[in-house]
Structures are given as structure tokens and as C-alpha cells.
């Protein structure tokens, strides 16, 4: 899914936020093949970004940047980028690699079964 340009810092003006249906426990988020190795994929309708830091190791985080609330973007660049102000987050634990964000992305518990990623 291609990112949609957002109004800087105002989630209520970001078109993706009006589509978010947070994942319910046991709900399917994605297929493992949707997530690049060494990168991340945003699943906007679920408000979730799923990462694959190394092959077969999947992690998930809330897709809302902790700086001003814009959605982060999908990437193959080895980090989770914020498309509004340039913050960068670690693929493994969601910690801040570069500001202006100061707080990590909150984790989303997931399970991987038969090539599918589900919330735990």
C-alpha cells in the first residue's frame, strides 16, 4: 500500500487514520511474504507496521509515530521511517534511531502460523 501524504502532525487530517480498525486478538494482519527482509510494511487498515529484521523473524508495532502522530512508512532501508518529520525507528524493538521522535513505537504482540501473521 502506498503511503498517502499527511498533514504534518494532525492525525485527524491523515486519510489513513479514518480507515484504521485496530487488530483484535487472533485477527490476521498480513502474509509473511508481504514483509521485506531488512524492512517493514505498514498495514494502515490495522494501524500496524510489521518488520522482518532478519529472515523469518517478524515483529509488529503501532504504526503511529510517537512524535506528532503521523503514520510511519513502509521501507526496505533497514529501519521504520516516519514520513512526516523524518524520525527513524529500529526494526527489532521500535526504539528511536533518529528524532525528532523521543519515544519508541509501542509493540503489537503477534504470532506467525502457516505463512500468516496474526495478533496474539
Image: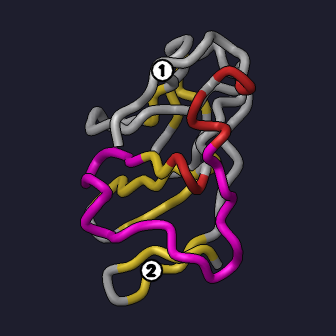
Residue at 34% x, 89% y: name it.
Answer: 114
Residue 4 lies in the magenta-colored region: no
Indicate whether 32 appears above or below 15. below
* The quadrant where residue 9 appears: top right
How far apart in space, not on screen, are marks 1 and 2 (Cα)? 28 Å
Give me the disc on residue 112: 2
Residue at 26% x, 53% y: name it.
Answer: 36
Indicate whether 112 appears above or below 101. below
* The quadrant where residue 33 appears: bottom left
Give the magenta part as a residue range: 19-41
The mark nearer the N terminus, 1 or 2, is 1
| Residue on which the image places disc 1 | 83
| Residue 99, image x, y percentages | 60, 15
| Residue 29, image x, y percentages | 50, 67
Describe residue 79's horizontal placement relative to residue 119 as left or right.
Answer: left
Looking at the image, the residue that sits furthest to the bottom is: 114
Describe residue 59's horizontal placement relative to residue 37 as left or right.
Answer: right
Q: Tell me the element at label 2.
A: strand
* The quadrant where residue 60 appears: bottom right
| Residue 118, image x, y percentages | 53, 76
Amino acid at each position: 500500500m502506498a503511503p498517502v501524504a499527511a498533514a504534518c502532525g494532525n492525525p485527524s487530517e491523515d486519510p489513513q487514520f479514518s480507515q484504521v480498525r485496530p487488530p483484535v486478538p487472533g485477527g490476521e494482519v498480513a502474509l509473511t511474504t508481504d514483509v521485506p527482509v531488512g524492512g517493514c510494511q505498514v498495514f494502515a487498515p490495522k494501524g500496524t507496521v510489521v518488520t522482518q529484521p532478519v529472515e523469518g523473524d517478524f515483529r509488529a508495532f503501532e504504526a503511529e509515530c510517537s512524535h506528532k502522530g503521523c503514520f510511519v512508512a513502509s521501507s526496505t532501508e533497514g529501519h521504520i521511517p516516519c514520513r512526516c518529520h523524518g524520525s527513524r525507528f529500529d526494526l527489532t524493538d521500535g526504539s528511536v534511531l533518529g528524532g525528532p521522535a523521543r519515544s519508541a513505537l509501542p509493540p503489537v504482540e503477534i504470532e506467525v502460523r502457516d505463512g500468516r501473521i496474526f495478533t496474539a
